[in-house]
Amino acid sequence: MRMPPIGFGCSPFRPGGRRVDLEGAVRSAVTTGYHLFDLAELYGNERTVGRALRLAPRSDLFLVGKAWRTSFRPAALRRACEDSLLRLGIEAFDLYLLHAPEAWKHSGPLGEPEEAGWKEFERRAVPRDAQGEIELDPVPLAETWEAMRDLAQRGLTEGVGVSNFGLEHLDALGPERPAVNQIAHSPYKPNGDVVDCCRQWGIGLMAHSPLSAAGLLAEPVLAELAGRHQCTPAQVVLRWNLARGLVPLPSSSDPVHLAENLRAVDGELDPAALAAGDSLAARAVDSPR
């Protein structure tokens, strides 16, 4: 599947549980020249993001949606996809993903926080039993994957894929491989086994939260590489992702950073810089996402 080389991540969640309103940032991203936008049922902002995306013709955009864990049964999955399209004001996604491999109990459509409030939205998104434990749903991944393929056959999405899937989850889907696996991928967290497997199986790769690992952009190695390549540390990380064959999905509300991130596609890292980026996996720290 051909995708723009870099995209904009529309998750409103920030470290510490903070949420941000991204409508203005998405407007800036559209006018700056972004074409790929990564959305999700869980983000709770499809209606506001959809308004911002109307600044560009639909044909200029590559829109990715994601079904949350509570929408894995076929009827709920189709409802989730149709509701997301309605909130966004579009007829079909370019790519629709399963947000994560583990199914949770369905407690009704998530809706949007502006309709039900964040407390109710979170109750539906994270179902818990009387002891406070997350309630799982034993629906087989293969059943959900068949329902995903049905969405494409119905014309609700051009392609279907997955997100945050490991090797065992990819294998559980059966012989029909997803078009894309969206994963955490940064110099601190290269996910080498999954990347290698996806390449072998012809599965495209996207990198969510490529700049979010704690301490990554303050990494001295990246500062040195940025100085040598006359770019920013963030551009170094994005170019490292591009060189490794992934479509990175950075997010920012700062117009300057938005433009800088998009310009990462205008340059490349030399082999020594790529190797230096690879070496940072040994210093991995937990991402705040």
Image: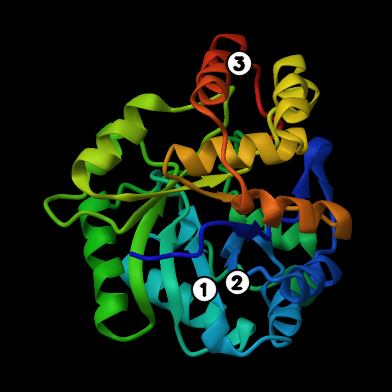
Q: Is residue 237 left or right of residue 259?
A: left
* C-alpha span from label 2 to label 3: 31 Å
Q: Answer with the quarter of the image where residue 214 lies.
A: top right
Q: How many marks?
A: 3
Determine whether label 2 and label 3 are within 8 Å by CB. Answer: no
Q: Earlier in the sequence, mark 2 or mark 3?
A: 2
Tell me if residue 6 comes above or below residue 226 in the rendering: below
Residue 265, label in figure: none
Look at the numbered disc 1 and give the secondary structure of its residue: strand
What residue is pinned by disc 2? 35
Instruction: Determine the CA span between mark 3 and mark 1.
Output: 32 Å
Residue at point 80%, 64% (across, down): 22
Q: Residues within 10 Å of mark 3 (few under 14, many from 20)?
A: some
User: In x, y percent, where is residue 179?
Assistant: 30, 59
Which is more N-terminal, label 1 or label 3? Answer: 1
Q: Where's residue 117, x and y in %?
A: 80, 67
- The residue shown at (75%, 49%) is 13
Mark found first going from the N terminus, 2 or 1: 2
Report the front residue among 56 and 274.
Answer: 274
Label 2 is placed on what type of residue?
A: His
Residue that appears at 50% across and 64% down: 4
Q: Does the rendering let one see residue 174?
A: yes
Helix, strand or loop under label 3: loop
Determine whether label 3 and label 1 are within 8 Å by CB: no
Most extreme residue toward the left is 175
Residue 62: numbered disc: 1
Q: Which residue is mark 3?
A: 284
Residue type, numbered disc 3: Ala
